[in-house]
Amino acid sequence: METGNLYKVLGVLKGASQEEIRRSYRKLAREHHPDANRDDPKAEERFKEIQHAYEILSNPKKRRQYDEGPRTFFGGGNAPQGNAGGARTGDFSDPDLSDLFGGFGGLGDIFGRSARARETSSKGQSVTVSVNLSFKDALNGVTTRVNVPVEEACGDCRGTGAAPGTSPRTCPECGGRGVRSRDQGFFAFSEPCVRCGGEGTIVEKPCPTCSGSGRLRKARQVTVRIPAGAKDGMKIRVPGRGSAGKRGGATGDLFVVTRVAEHSVFKRRGDDFIVEVPVSFVEAALGAGIEVPRPGGGTVKLRLPAGTQDGKQFRVRGAGAPKARARSGERGDLIVRTRLVVPKKLKKREREILETLAEERDEDIRGELFKKVGS
Ligand SMILES: [Zn+2]
Ligand SMILES: [Zn+2]
């Protein structure tokens, strides 16, 4: 589907609040609903576009990903599905919207997407947690433990939700399909079975441990390897350590987002670090070999050429952060930025030398400036 600018589709500004997005969506959805525009063959397409835009922008995580544009995540494989607690495609989980769609006799068949019974098994939800790292740990890499709130299958009922000794039985209302069909004027549509809530099975005696849900919330400790050179905001995927799937479905994934403490001297930029070093007027004028601290300890030598200016940048190749994504031991660079320091006090001898210099050096340093002002 050609999405264009999702904000434009919903008629809101980029910085719009969730409430504004929701309001605008409700308004547009009413206006463009195919049921209300039966004479307009394009209404459905437009409505889908609005739906799609809302689905992304109403989910803070998807919205952030959309705002940031395409990006890759560490760990290879699939990017996260973004459904940790969020809505799946076409799944209107916002209860506030039920009245909107309730009035239109169900959306299912209009779009050829019937309200199916929930799949017999489904993958567990992915879980995202953040981990705080010191500058040093992020640079060198570290193995750490994180607390992960997950849903696990209840052991007492083996995830069925039925009290031990009993088992769920097929819903007599829908015969296990989870949906009921109904004709209403122009449209035939299906709706979730009320009796079984769309599950297709009913539990007569709920398991007391999980109150019939078949699932329990737990905090699980997971060991995560943070690669050397981890950046702030990096997302590390740990497959299969999220919530348990339903009815034998695969376990969801765990995503660990790094929060790296800032360093007072080294500023990160991509895989590079920037360090600002004081340089004396004499060093800058004459040129000098200086030592510069490097992240992770030690120093690097740098040759300043004569006539080095304030704010000049030098790149020391390979002295930056290890590239967390590359396993080849590649590193970023260290960018050294000079800061010219003028002595606040001079010794007698220094003063004499500089006074001599001032006399001998007949330099019109602001001439260029005044020329520009004049023209
Ligand atoms: Zn149970
Ligand atoms: Zn049923």
Image (cartoon, rainbow, N blue to C red):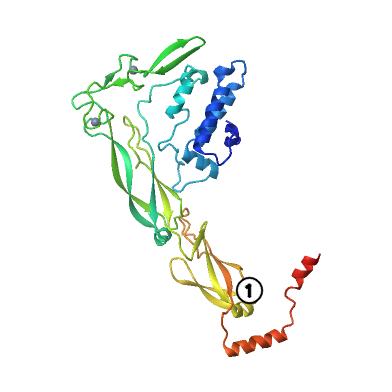
Q: Is residue 52 visible?
A: no
Image quarter where the N terminus lies is top right
The residue located at (45%, 48%) in the rendering is 74
Q: Nearer the viewer, residue 304 or 330?
A: 304
Specify the amino acid type for callout 1.
Thr
**81 vs 207: above or below:** below
Q: Name the foreground residue: 337 vs 245.
A: 337
Q: Is residue 113 left or right of residue 43?
A: left
Relative height, residue 181 to residue 255 (above, below)? above
Instruction: Categorize mark 1 by other alpha carbons within 10 Å: few (<14), some (14-19), many (20+).
Output: some
Does the image show residue 242? yes
Residue 92 placement: quadrant: top left
What is the secondary structure assignment of the residue under circle 1?
loop
Residue 304 point in image, percent of width and height: 59, 74
Residue 183 in picture, x, y percent from top left: 46, 10
Judge by depth and name the residue closer to the eye, 368 or 164.
368
> Percent position (x, y) of residue 232?
46, 54
Task: Tell me the residue that label 1 is attached to.
Answer: 308
Residue at image x 74%, y 79%? 363
User: Which quadrant of the frame does ligand 2 lie within?
Assistant: top left
* Residue plotted at (57% across, 87% down): 347
Instruction: Decide if residue 127 is on the left or right side of residue 105.
Output: left
